[in-house]
Every structure is written in C-alpha cells, then in structure tokens.
Amino acid sequence: MTKVTYRQFGAVGDGKTDDMSAIVAAHAYANEHGLPVSATAGDTYYIGGKNQTAIITTNTDWTGARFILDDLELENINQSIFLVPQEYEAEELSLSKLAHGQKHIDMTFPSTVMISVKDDTRRNYIRMGVNASNGVPVSDTFLCNADGEVLNDIMWEFPQITSASVRRIEETPLVIEGGHFTTIANQMPSKYTYHARNIVVKRSHTTVRGITHRVEGEGEHGAPYGGFLSANGCAYVTFENCSLSGHKIYYTPGNGGMSPMGTYDVGLHACAFVTLRGITQVPDIMDSTRWGLMGSNYCKNITLENCEMSRFDAHMGVTHAIVRGCKLGWQCVHAIGEGDFLVADSERCGRSLLSLRYDYGGHWDGTLTLRNVTWYPKSEHPSVISGANPGTHDFGYPCKMPTFIKIEGLRIVDTDPRIQDIALLSQYADEPTFDKPYPYQVPEEVVYSDVRCDSGRDVLPYRDKAFYPQTKITEA
C-alpha cells in the first residue's frame, strides 16, 4: 500500500452516509504506517455531529472531493474535524526573568524551540467597550535556536516569570491540500459559545493549500465560529490559495451593550512566522453584513500576500506584520501590537486605512510604513491612521501610536459624497490626554511623499494641532 484512502476504511462518499468514523480510522492507520492519505475525487463525505476528530500526521490530499459538515446537532461544539497535532510535548522550563527586546537567553537546546512564559501577578489587554474585561495574565511566546538566540521579539518586560515551558518545533514539512468544504451552520442562540468544527494546525512547518469553504443555512440566530482554518501554538505555517467565507454577523448583549460576534474563517493564536498567501473571500469583501475573515491573538511575524478579504484583525497584539499586494474590504485593518508594520502595493477600503483598536487602547509600539497604497475612504472625516484612547483607562501597558510613520505613495479615491475632509492622523479623544491618568503617546515623526486625492483636495496632517503638539510632520 502506497497511500490510504477513506474508501478503504468504509467511507461511502454519497453525501448522506456519515463517513466520519471511516475518515478517523483511515488517518489513524496512515499515521501508524507513515503513509499519505488521499480522498477519492468525486466523493462527497458527510460528517455529522459525532464527537470525533481525525488526527493528521501525514501528507493529505483532498483534491476533487467534497465534505459536508452538518452542525445542526452536535455532541461537542468544541470538537475539531481535523487536527494536525504537535509532535513534541512541552516541558517545564526554569526561567526567572526576561527583558523586552532581549536577543539571547543563556541556554542551549537540541534544535529550534518555542518558549512560552507567563507572569500571573500582572495583567494586560484589559479591554474596554461593549466587551470589557479585566484582562489576562502577561504572557509571551517566542522562538529560540539551538544556541539560545531569540528569533523573534520578546514583547513584554518580565521582571518575574511564574511559569515557563519549552517545546521543540517540527522541522520536516507537512502538506494538506484540496477539498471543498460546506458547513451547514448551527442554529444555536446568538451567544459567545464559539464553535470549532474546523481544521486546526498545531504542528510547525505545515502548509494548507487549495481549500474551499462555504457556509449554508445561516438563519436569524447562530453561535459564532473560531476559525475554519486555525493555527495554534506553532510556527512557519502557511495557508495559501484558499477560497473562504465571511460569516453572517449576529449580535449578543455584552458588558456595555449589544455586541457583534465575530466569526472568522482564519484564526491564529500564539503563532509565529505565519503566511496567508492568495486567500480570497466570498461574498463581496464590502458586504457589511459579513464579519471579517481573519483574526489573531498573541501572534508574531504575520505576512499577508496577494489576499482579498474584508479585514486583517489583530486583537491581543501582533509583533511585526506585512500586508503586501492585498485588497482589503469594509473592515480594512484593525490591529494593536508592536514592531514594524508594512503595508505595500495594496488597496484598502474603510473609515481608516489603519485602525488601531480602541478597545485595547489604540496601541502600536513601533513603526508604520505605507508604500504604494490606494485607499477608498468611507466616512465624513476619514483618517489614514486612526486610534482612540480617552486617557482614563488602564489597559495594562502604556498606549501609543506608532513612533515613526512613513508614507511613500498614497492614492486616496475620495469619491464618497459624505467626505468633508481627510487627515493623516485622527483626533483620538474628545480632548488631548497629556494630563490624563493614562496619557496616549502620539507619533514622534511622520514623513510623507506622493500623497494625493483624486478630487485634488488637500490632505490635512491632523484636524487639531493640540493633539499633536510635538509631532514632527514633514512632506518629503
């Protein structure tokens, strides 16, 4: 036997018979014998609500096959359909402190490792707004090579560490490709009971490509999903050439009022060096009844290349991000984090070109570069970069706009008749926050060149100099 098929283990592939047990058994056999798995082109595999997950540790090819995921009656809403697990277990690590930006730790390892640290005595990401929270323990995840060199930035100061772990990352590549998946949407109450029912990658050096995902049966209410394609706690993961779906927006009561619940078709959590390449979204990326395609937490070194989707969203921090050759829709870019953020050769829509999430303090500790970007603003007073921070809320960290902003070529298609003026920097509060308990730090310098509106109108540096008294703004 050179490969394993689902039919060999009893799958029918008629779109009606539940084939999940056969799929689970096929992958278990393939994993044990180190064999690739192939679906049969033309087959349609129905997957009902059984509490089962197929474990993938070998290359898998679903090209030409279809999968129906029926979410109407589930035994376990947290169960994934497919899981690509990590090969190495995490081990406890003796580490007492770390410094923000530290480049080396005095340890050696058998190979490249992923280190996770936490300080339970402090909290950050203390969210405000309709989804207000008391935050989470200060934590970080980063890579080290065998000699202890830190391969991506340590994001926080850790004068003490209450727990730490280390895990080797996988070095050999694994590929999953092909397949058309249809989710029959759940009809649960519209509450924050996130459903999985997805493909989860926890193994480093994994590529998922050529997947199509569609959603049917969304009604008047439904629970959100956490990401049909998900990566969690791994590095060097690529999702490419996939056609994914925006999900209907449902609303639920939050701590501060009715809150839209975000369902993402791509979810990233505590990952490093993740690439999304050639990802497209249906329906229209300007359809405001559909939630944004991609969301992340605690990630580092995210790259989007040649994607077309409604939103790039980084909730609890991203360190270093690149968006190149992309078209982003009505939600555009919502992010907080640190490091270098590059947007190049891209088209953007939305109220702002880059929106620094107000619910986490509008925070970006680093630089922002916009290069050869076209923007379609959609409000009365749009700003290229917007942040919102009242200066009265403790988010767990000092909040700031990018320290240095460089704009090299920005075309503004200002055809929306509502537009009254356009500014580079937003008015981030009702009044400047310099004397507030938690002042918002504004940019030190903005350098721009070749910024032009189709209408010929001038672009303001800001609407009120009182908010940016020390910011140096230069037209190069």
Image (spheres, helix red, strand yellow):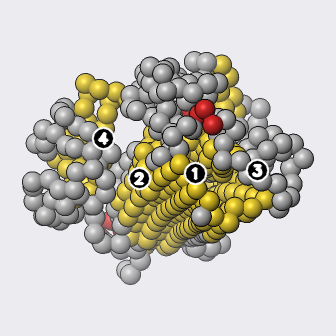
Q: Nearer the viewer, residue 22 or 310?
A: 310
Q: Is residue 297 above or below residue 231?
A: above
- Between the residue at mark 4 and the residue at mark 2, the CA separation in whole angstroms equals 12 Å
- Between the residue at mark 3 and the residue at mark 1, the CA separation in whole angstroms equals 22 Å
Instruction: Check residue 377 in the rendering and tell me which mark sits there, or answer none.
Output: 3
Q: Which residue is found at the position 58% from the left and 73% from the top?
A: 63
Q: Is residue 63 above or below residue 78?
A: below
- In the displayed structure image, the side of residue 452 where residue 89 appears, left or right: left
Task: Tell me which label, 3 or 1, sits earlier in the chain.
Answer: 3
Task: Tell me which label, 1 or 4, sits earlier in the chain.
Answer: 4
Single out the mark in the foreground, 3 or 1. Answer: 1
Task: Tell me which label, 2 or 1, sits earlier in the chain.
Answer: 2
Report x, y in % for residue 258. 68, 22
Instruction: Check residue 156 in the rendering and tell me which mark sits there, or answer none.
Output: 4
**Residue at mark 1:** 473
Q: Nearer the viewer, residue 42 or 437?
A: 437
Q: Secondary structure at mark 3?
A: strand
Task: Tell me which label, 3 or 4, sits earlier in the chain.
Answer: 4
- Any part of residue 177 in sight: yes
Q: Amino acid at mark 3?
A: Pro
